[in-house]
Image: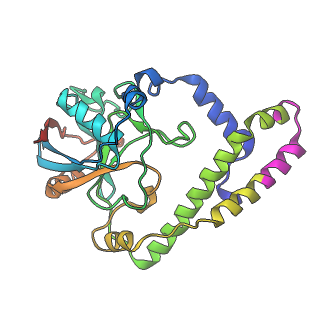
Amino acid sequence: MHKILLSLTTLLISLASCNAGANTDSAANNNPTSEMESNNTTAPDTSSAMVDIKTSLGDIRILLYGETPKHRDNFIKLVESDFYNGTLFHRVINKFMIQAGDPDSKGAAPGKMLGAGGPGYQIDAEIVYPKYFHKRGALAAARQGDQVNPERKSSGSQFYIVTGDVVNDSAIKQMEQHLNMQQQQQIFNQLVMKHRDQIMVMQQNQDNAGLQALQQQLIKETEAEAAKNPLKLTPEQIEAYTSVGGTPHLDNQYTVFGEIVSGMDVVAKIEKVKTDQADRPTEDVKIISMEIVK
């Protein structure tokens, strides 16, 4: 437990510097879901949707889940505005995932670093776990890391398709341990934020003994809270990961909002292309167009 926890001061310094630095992706008035949520008094729409993606290596059809409506509606909005047309699969890692959705990738020069672009907003996390997980063919939203994004908000446009690899029973046990470590870290981070002001005062007063005592207290609270709900992979997860594969270490961390219906052979072609040191394909793999299936 102690090995995975940042110190209180290190964690707060990281969060404070990131929060003060920029909010370019998460301004509330730019979030496309904010106005819709405030005015919506009807029952939520949980219908799914289909999207066809035409790429330079073939066609892919995806299903957008109804249980992640913010991501579904945002994706549909971007598709209908031709946002993705001309963008690249800018990050490709064999037996892991293929990533796209950076508007800066349109017409990008060879070798240009990509992956920081977006529409100027983020989407609230909709992590429906364990129902939706990182099996091969899952569609999920990219995001910034927990230290700068503790609420795990998704990128407004970048997404990835899981490829991954098949795992054995021993790996399944290791994954469950990893999931529980992630859960403990998340609980600890949340407790730290609740005590933020107290910690800042202690830090200013150089009260190292007080900081150490509080850290030990929060570790005990973390362990007690995590013990109430230990994480185990479901039979559906185990079946998927030991047969078709996936990336289980990402489970419960990112919003999975859809899956591939057809075209996994195209995804397999993309994941095997030659890439540079930044995981960008040396020959562009382009999204030519996307279309909502009526």
From the viewer's perspective, tell me whether residue 204 is left or right of residue 271.
right
Along the line of sight, the residue nearer the viewer: 49 or 55? 49
Figure quadrant of residue 121:
top left
Q: Is residue 213 magenta?
A: yes
Q: Is residue 28 left or right of residue 211?
A: left
Residue 196 is a magenta residue: no
Does residue 101 appear in this view?
Answer: no
Q: Position of residue 77 (x, y in %)?
A: 24, 31
Quarter of the picture holding the C terminus: top left
In terms of image quadrants, where is residue 54? top left
Q: Is residue 208 left or right of residue 51?
A: right
Part of the protein shown in magenta: 203-217
For this view, does 140 lie left or right of residue 7?
left
- Reply above or below: 203 against 248: above
User: What secondary structure prevails in the magenta region?
Assistant: helix
Residue 252: give x, y in percent of width and height.
46, 55
User: Residue 73, percent across and down?
Assistant: 28, 37
The answer to which of 264 and 40 lies nearer the viewer is 40
- Seen at 87% across and 35% down, the residue is 206
